[in-house]
Every structure is written in C-alpha cells, then in structure tokens.
Image (cartoon, helix red, strand yellow):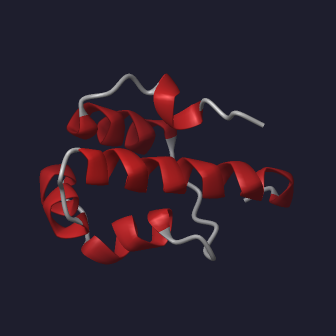
Amino acid sequence: MDMEFKNNYLKIGLKIAYYRKLKSLTQEQLAEILDCGVSFIGQIEAPNIYKAISLDTLFRIAKALEIPPYKLMKFDD
C-alpha cells in the first residue's frame, strides 16, 4: 500500500463502519453477506490498521450496505 494514501484507507474503513451500523448490521452479518471473514471486516474498519481493499471489494461492500460506492470515498477534508 502506498503510505501516501493510508489516511484515505482509514477514512474508507470508518465510513464502512458508519454505514454498517446505520443499517444495524454487525461485522459478522456483513462478513456473511460478503462471504468473507469477520477479521477482514474488522481490519478494514479498525482505526489503527491501514488495510488496502480492491475496488471490487469496495463495490461489494457498497452493494451490501445499499449505498452508492462514492459515499465510501467522499472525504470532507
């Protein structure tokens, strides 16, 4: 991962957590929908871990959360 963008990955993870909670989903439930491990979701959302994700994964998460993908990448700096 390019360290130049680590803050962006952090923001994406926090947004995923926000929208997940807004839909009243646990990490376990989201992981089940995405057919991935709970630890993967935990790593993405963790504020102290910079986990890079692919666009495919971002699109799948947005679909599972029923939001347009841009909402996960709109940063209000």
Which residue is at 78% across, 37% downward?
A: 77
Horizontal side of 71 relative to 34 (left or right) equals right
Is 58 displayed left or right of 46 in the figure?
left
The foreground one among 29 and 55 is: 29
Position of residue 17 measured from the top left corner of the image (x, y, whole percent):
40, 56
Q: Is residue 14 above or below residue 26?
A: above
Rendered position, 23 above or below 37: above
Foreground: 23 or 55?
23
Q: In the shown orientation, is residue 10 left or right of residue 4?
A: left
Task: Give the mark count.
Answer: 0
Side of 18 where 75 appears, left or right: right
- What residue lies at 21% left-to-right and 61% top-to-bottom? 31
Residue 74, quarter of picture: top right
Q: Residue at x 80, y 56 (%)?
A: 2
Quarter of the rendering containing residue 19: top left
Q: Quadrant of the N terminus?
A: bottom right
Task: Name the residue furthest right.
Answer: 4
Report x, y in % for residue 47. Answer: 59, 70
Residue 35 image offset from top left, x and y in percent? 17, 57
